[in-house]
Image (cartoon, rainbow, N blue to C red):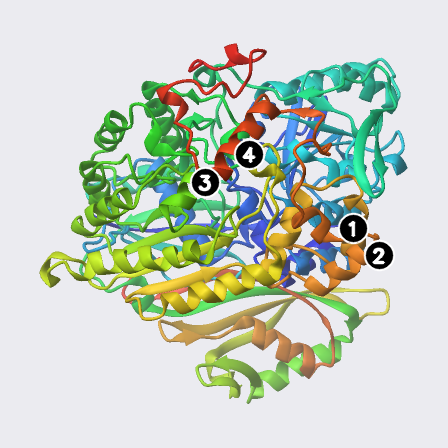
Amino acid sequence: MRIIANFHKGEELRFISHLDVMRLLQRAMRRARLPLAFSQGFNPHPILAFASALAVGHTSDAEWMDVQLTEAVDPDEFVSRLNAQIPEGLRVRRALEIDEKLPTLTALLQRAEYEATVLFAPPVGRAALEEGIKTLAGGPIVVLKHTKSGMKNVDIRPQLLSLSLGEADEDASGDVARAVLCITGKLSADGGLQTELLLRALLSACGAQGSIRVHRKFLYFDRIEV
Amino acid sequence: MNSTALDEILSAVEKPARYTGGEWNSIVKEDADVRVALCFPDVYEIGMSHLGSRILYHVLNARPDIACERVYAPWTDMEAALRARALPLFSLETRRPLRAFDIVGFSLLYEMCYTNILTMLELAGIPVNAADRGEDMPLILCGGPSACNAEPVADFMDAVMLGDGEELFPEVVDAWREARAAGKTKREILLRLSRIPGVYVPSFYEARYENGAFAALEKREPSAPDTIVRRVVKDLDKAPYIGSPVVPNLSIVHDRAAVELFRGCTRGCRFCQAGYIYRPLRERKKDTVLRLARELVDCTGYDEVSLFSLSSSDYSRIHELVPELLDSFEGERVSVSLPSLRIDTFIKEDLERMQEVRKAGLTFAPEAGTQRLRDVINKNVTERDLLRAVGDAFDAGWTSVKLYFMIGLPTETDEDVLGIADLARKVSALFHQLPKEKRGKGLRLTVSASSFVPKPFTPFQWAAQDTADEIRRKQSLLKNALKGVRGVEFNYHASSVSMLEAAFSRGDRRLGKALREAHARGCRFDSWDEHFKPEAWKEAFAAAGLDPAYYANRERALDEPLPWGHMDMLVTQEYLKREYERALEAVSTKDCRSGCNGCFGEEYADYCKLS
C-alpha cells in the first residue's frame, strides 16, 4: 500500500536537516509500529521519500512524504498513530492512499508557493521596496549561485512565477520594517527557485539589509489533487 | 533568552540542531525545586553518545523535584556567535542560561576536553576559579573516569564525585537542597557535601611541593576526609538504567540503543584505566538485558541494539544472550552489535547470525605486536587467537577488519613495533589465500596505532611515556614496515596530543594554570585535530612555568607521592605495584574470573563476588 502524507514543519524543528527529518520519521514509524516496506538488497532501508527537500531554517505547511507499507492501514489511522510518536515541531495533517503505479512525488512536482518575511534593518522606504519588486519582476535576476562547475552568475528569473508584496508593517516615518512577500516558483526534480537567492536579490535591488524567514505554503503536483 | 538574536545565530552556525533540543523523549520541566545542568565538555554528537550522562539524566529526572537538563560545548562557530552577541550559554531543554541552574555537573571522560570546561563556564558568566565564585553562583561539580585524578581541574571545581553516580549524584543534590533550605553558606554546604562518601572538595586541601615536585596534599579543613573512597553501585541488575533515552535529531557518534551488559572488567590489561577503576565485575542478568533491549527499541525506534561493556564477549551468558536477543527481534529488522569483542572468546555461529541483519566492520585489539609485549601489558591473547578469529570472520564473509595497537608501551623495542606489521601481513595473507569465490570483494584492513598514555590507578601509573620524538620515530618505522601489505591502511595520532594527555592524566594542581593559559590562547576542542594548537600549548606551559615532559616522560619512583594519592579507587596501590613489577618481568596475571588476584586488599574484598 502506498500512502502520501502532508506534514507541517514548524519553529521547534526548523533547524534540523532534510536527512534528519527522514531519520526522525523512520524512527517514529517504527515506534508507531506502522508496517513499513523495505527495499531489497545489501542494505535494506524503508521505502520512504519526500517530495522535496526543505532548506534548513525554513518552516513549511507543505511537506509531503511518500511511503510504502506492507499491509493496509487506514490513512486517518496512519496520521494519528504517527502523530502520537513525533515531537513538537512536526505534525502530520492528512494522508491519502495513492496508486502505486504513479511516479514519485518528486517527479510529479511542479511549483511551490512561499511566504517570506523580511525584517528590514534599518527600515526601507515603501517606494524603494515596491520599485525593487518591480525590477525583479522585469528580470533578469542575476545572482551568484553554487553550480556543479563552481560559483556562477545565473539568471533565476525564469524560475520565478510570481512575486507580490503582502502585509507590511510601517514605522512612524512610513518606512517598512517588516514585509511579507508572496512567492511562487518553479520546483521539480531538477531543482527550482531558491527563495533565499531571490530575497537577497530583492534586498540589494532596494538597497536594504535585513533578515529573512521563509515558509513553504503549498506544493503543486501533476496528476495528484492535494 | 533573546530569541530573535538566537534565531539569527542559529541560522548562521553549522549544525544548529546541536543547540535546539526538542528531541523525542527529552524531558522539559517548567517547575522543579532543584535545577541541575549536566554539562558535557565536548560537542553534542559526542556528549549524547555518552552512556553515563544518559543514565544520570534519567536518574535525576526520575525525581519529580529535580529538573535535569543538558548542555554541550558549543562548537567554535557557536562560541564566537554567542560572544559576538553577548548571549549566555544555555540548556537544551528550557534554554535557560547555565548560570540560572543550582547545580552544574561536568562529565570528565578524557583530559583533552578540559579547555572546553573553561569555555563553558566563561560563556555562562561563571568565574572559572572556584575561589572567585560568590554565594550567588551555581555549585560546580565534576565526575566521570578522569575525576579519579581531578587535580588539574581542582581549581575550577567546588566538588568532585568519585565513582558510580546513580546513588551518589542524588545524595549530593539532596544534601545541597537541605543545606540551602537551611540558609547555609557555600562553605557550609561544601562541608556537608564532604561528609558524603565519594565526594572530594578540593578547596579543603592544599598541595605542597618540594624542590618543584609534588610532596603532599594537606588538609586545610580538619573535618575533611583523609582519603576519598570511590562509590560503587553494588547491584547493577537492580540499578536504574537510561529509561526512555533522548532520541537525537541529528546523527550522533553512537546512534543506537545501548544496553550496558556489565560494569567492571576481569582481564586486568595493565594499560587500561577503565579495567581498574570500574572494578568489581557486576553483570546485569540476561533477562534484564533482554527486557531493557526491548524497552529501548520500543521507545526510541532504533534499529540497532548494542551490547555495551568493557569486554562484551566476556559476558557470562553471551552465547545464550545473542541468539535470544536476535530471536526476540525476529522480523523487526533490528540488528545487534557487540563492541569490544575479545579475540579469544567469540564463536563463529554468533558472528554468522549477527551478520544476517547487518555486516558491520569488525574490530580487534591485540594492542601489541609480539607475545612478549602482550605479556607485559597482560593482554592475554595469542597470535593464534587473533588469526583464528579473523579467519572465522573472513570465512563468514567479512571484509573490513580493524586492528588496534599501541606504541610506546613500557619495555617496547623496535622488534615489538615491527611485530605489528608482521601480524598485519599475516592477517592480509589469510584473506588473500582464501579462494576468490569464498571471500568477500576487497580486504579493508585498518591498522590503528595510538600512542600509549600512562594513566593513574593502573600498574603503569609510574611508567614514563616515550618522548614525542621517539613516538614519531616508531610511527615511521611501522609505516615503512607496513608498505606493500595488501589492503592495509595505517592510522596514528599526533604525538604532541598524547603527550599533553599524559601530562594531564597524571598532573597535579599546578596544571590548572596551564589550562587557563592555554584557554586564553584560544585552545579549544584539543582532541579534534583541526583545533589542536601545539604552539599555543607550548606557550601556555611556559607561561605557567611548567614542562609537560616532567609529567609525561618521567618514570616515577615507586615511593614517590602521587598527586592522586588521596583518591581510593578500591584497587590497592600495593596491588598496582605488584602488577607493575610483574609487567617489567613480562609475567602475565590471570583473569580474575579464574581466581581472585586480591586487587582490593582485605578492606574492600567483600565488594567483589569473585573474591
Is B433 displayed left or right of B279 in the figure?
left
Is A203 displayed left or right of A86 in the figure?
right
Please say if the residues under marks 2 and 1 sit with CB atoms less than 8 Å apart: yes
Same chain under badges 2 and 4? The reply is: yes
Dot placed on the residue nearer the N-terminal end, 2 or 3: 3
The residue that appears at 60% across and 83% down in the rendered structure is A136
Q: CA distance from mark 1 to mark 3?
A: 34 Å
Mark 4, residue position: B459
Residue B47 falls in image quadrant:
top right
Under circle 4, the secondary element is: helix
Please say if the residues under marks 2 and 3 sit with CB atoms less than 8 Å apart: no
Report in which chain the residue with disc 2 lies: B
Please say if the residues under marks 1 and 4 sit with CB atoms less than 8 Å apart: no
Q: Residues within 10 Å of mark 4 (few under 14, many from 20)?
A: many
Dot placed on the residue nearer the N-terminal end, 1 or 4: 4
The residue that appears at 72% across and 25% down in the rendered structure is B566
Q: Is residue A76 something that shows in the picture?
A: no
Q: Which mark is residue B376?
A: 3
Same chain under badges 2 and 3? The reply is: yes
Under circle 2, the secondary element is: helix
Q: Residues within 10 Å of mark 3 (few under 14, many from 20)?
A: many
Q: On screen, B265 above or below B584?
A: above
Residue B539 picture location, percent across and down? 79, 61
Q: CA distance from mark 1 to mark 4?
A: 27 Å
- Which image quadrant: the C terminus of chain A? bottom left
Residue B88 picture location, percent across and down? 77, 48
Please say if the residues under marks 4 and 3 sit with CB atoms less than 8 Å apart: no
Mark 1, residue position: B514
Report in which chain the residue with disc 4 lies: B
